[in-house]
Image (cartoon, helix red, strand yellow):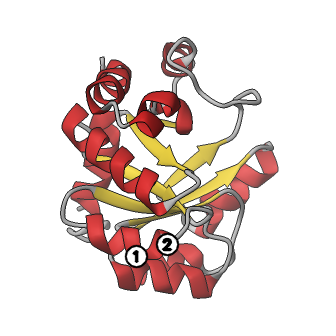
């Protein structure tokens, strides 16, 4: 019998089925909204919005019906609660935040906890992470060119930062170019 509550199952399945999760860390709310619209059109069903994004919590609530929406760079329990209240279906922390996994699970949501060293990965697992987010990427993060290397190494899913968005096209309002660029990560 699966011990995972039913509301967590579709989100976990959605993340794993999509295999690539866009992680947005953009300079403005407007650019983030445009990027989210483009990602939806490109076919993405899951997105992570980092707490470094202006009005990130508001954006979680605004897009919770359109995506499996996650809150990234969650560094404390107060922020985690606010994200869950806004509708975040998964919480992502780059490091161990004691109690975050329990808080997420009590709300029947997922907790993705980051780690770099074997000890950090074990601590995330012991804390109750549904998924442990490894940080092996080089400076600049995962690119279209390096994406398949992560899958070949055994990654179940890969988080791709702003490389998933053609930044110049987004700023210029060239929607078709942004959508086409993002769609390449789903192939």
Q: Is residue 86 above or below residue 19?
A: below
The dot on residue 43 is none
For the N terminus, the quadrant is bottom left
Above or below for 8 versus 41:
below
Say few, some or many: other residues with alpha carbon within 10 Å of mark 2 (under 14 / 14 to 19 / 20 or more). some
Q: CA distance from mark 2 to mark 1?
A: 5 Å
Q: Nearer the viewer, residue 104 or 79?
A: 79
Are discs 2 and 1 less than 8 Å apart at CB? yes
- Where residue 55 appears, x then y in whole percent? 49, 72
Q: Report which residue position mark 2 lands on.
A: 55
Residue at image location 31% in from the left, 66% down from the top: 4
**Residue at image location 20% in from the left, 58% down from the top:** 66
Label 2 SS: loop
Residue ID for mark 1: 58
Report x, y in % for residue 133: 59, 47
Q: Nearer the viewer, residue 52 or 111?
A: 52
Residue 155 on image: x %, y %: 51, 29
SS state under label 1: helix
Is 137 placed left or right of 26 in the picture? Answer: right
């Amino acid at each position: 019998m699966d011990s995972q509550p039913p509301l967590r199952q579709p989100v976990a399945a959605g993340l794993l089925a999509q295999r690539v999760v866009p992680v947005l860390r953009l300079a403005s709310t407007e650019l983030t909204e445009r990027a989210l619209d483009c990602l939806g059109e490109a076919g993405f069903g899951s997105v992570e919005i980092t707490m470094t994004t202006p009005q990130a919590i508001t954006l979680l609530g605004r897009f919770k019906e359109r995506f499996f929406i996650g809150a990234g760079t969650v560094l404390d329990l107060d922020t985690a609660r606010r994200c869950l209240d806004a509708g975040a279906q998964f919480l992502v922390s780059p490091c161990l935040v004691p109690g975050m996994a329990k808080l997420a699970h009590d709300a029947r949501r997922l907790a993705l906890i980051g780690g770099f060293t074997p000890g950090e990965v074990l601590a995330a697992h012991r804390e109750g992470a549904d998924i442990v987010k490894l940080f092996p990427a080089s400076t600049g993060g995962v690119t279209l060119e390096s994406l398949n290397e992560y899958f070949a190494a055994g990654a179940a899913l890969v988080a791709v930062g702003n490389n998933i968005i053609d930044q110049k096209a987004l700023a210029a309002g060239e929607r078709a170019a942004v959508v086409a660029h993002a769609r390449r990560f789903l192939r």
